[in-house]
Structures are given as C-alpha cells and as structure tokens.
Image: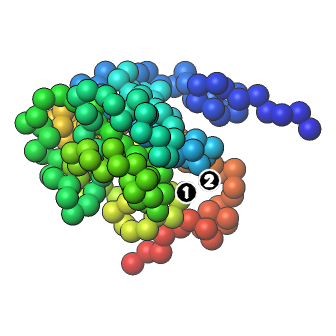
Amino acid sequence: MAKRVRCERCRRPQALCYCAELSPLDNVWPIWILQHPAEARHALGTARIAALGLRECTLALSEQTDTAHPFATAEPAPALIYPGPTSRPLHELADTPLRPLLFIDATWRKSRRMLMENPWLEALPRYALPAPPPSRYRIRREPNPEAISTLEAIVHCLGLLEGDATRYHPLLEQMDRLVDEQIAHMGEEVFVRNYRRDED
C-alpha cells in the first residue's frame, strides 16, 4: 500500500491539510512550546496549530536532560506557564517586562518527568493560569476536569494577558474542526465508548 503523502507544515495527510485555513495572528507575548517527542507523533497534537497560527511562536522538541537546549540559555529567561505550589498568579506576569511564555506539550505524567530531568526548567519563574473554561479537546481523557490542551492553555493565557478573550478563538475553531473530523472517522460508537465524559 502506498504511503499517504503528508503536508510538511501541519503533518496531516495532504487531503486533510488545514494550512490554508489558518491566517497567522500577531501575538504580543511570544510563545515557546517545549514538546515531548511522543507528542510530535500525535496525529491531533494541538501545539502545531499554535505554531502555525501565531506569528510569534517557536515549537521545539525536548531533548530530556540536554542543558544546552536553546530555551535553556535564552535571555531574557522565559516564564514557565505551569501549575504548582510555587506558581504565581498569571495576572502578576502582566506587570513584568515582556518575555517569552513557555508551555510544556506533554501528558501530565511526562511533563512532570521533564521538569525533574531538566533543572533549567525547574529554575524558571513559574506562573499558573486561573481556572480555564472546560476543555473542548474531546478525544483525550484528562486526569481532572480542569485539564486542557496545550493550545487551549495558550489561547487562554494570551487572552488574559492581552485583554482580549476572543482574539485567538479562530485557533480553537480549527482544533474543533480537526476533532470533529477525527470523531467522524472513528465513528460515534467508538467515541462514546472511549472518550465521552459521563454526564452528571
């Protein structure tokens, strides 16, 4: 069987390429995404939508314990957007000089391991998002109701810092289309059995 041709930018099969549907948006706060290698192979990873849909966005693979990673030696150091007991409220970031915002693109378990294996990540100033809206990413089971995709975290963060909650919603709408396509491909029965959240 012939191998399907994929778009080199969005990594989707050519027939399902969404590059033409995205008009890059000008974001004030630069976005950096440190991606676990396993996420790079995920067919519907949301970090690539951010990388293609924001003019100031850099997506780079994590090299685990590589302290020479470009993100590790950057000046000024980025602000890590990640929850935890040492995280400061996001609104405090608005009063600091502009700097890149660093997001980890991985499962919760793998992101915690990345933090442990990379002292430079642990040393970054850390900020936490306030409670986000419920996740729209319906094809992955999350560890808790507050968990959201990388793209949703980025959109929520930029909306709060830049004072415009809807400016980056076209990126979420693109994610919605990809999720709908995937659900249609797998079939409603498979989706309900594997991903449908129980209703209260």
Please state the horizontal and vertical placement of residue 68, each as a whole percent of the image. Answer: 43, 33
Where's the N terminus, which quadrant?
top right
What colouring method underlies this structural image?
A: rainbow
Identify the residue at image location x=44%, y=74%: 199
Task: State the residue position of label 2.
Answer: 183
Residue 89 is tagged as none
Q: Of helix, strand and loop, which one carries label 2?
A: helix
Residue 179 drawn above or below residue 85: above
Is residue 29 in view? Answer: no
Mark 1, Cα crowd under 10 Å, few <14 / some 14-19 / many 20+, is: some
Where's the C terminus, which quadrant?
bottom left
Residue 37 drawn above or below residue 20: below
Task: State the residue position of label 1.
Answer: 139
Q: Of helix, strand and loop, which one carries label 1?
A: loop
Which image quadrant is residue 20 in?
top right
Please state the horizontal and vertical placement of residue 76, each as a whole percent of the image. Answer: 23, 28
| CA–CA distance in space, label 2 to label 1 | 8 Å
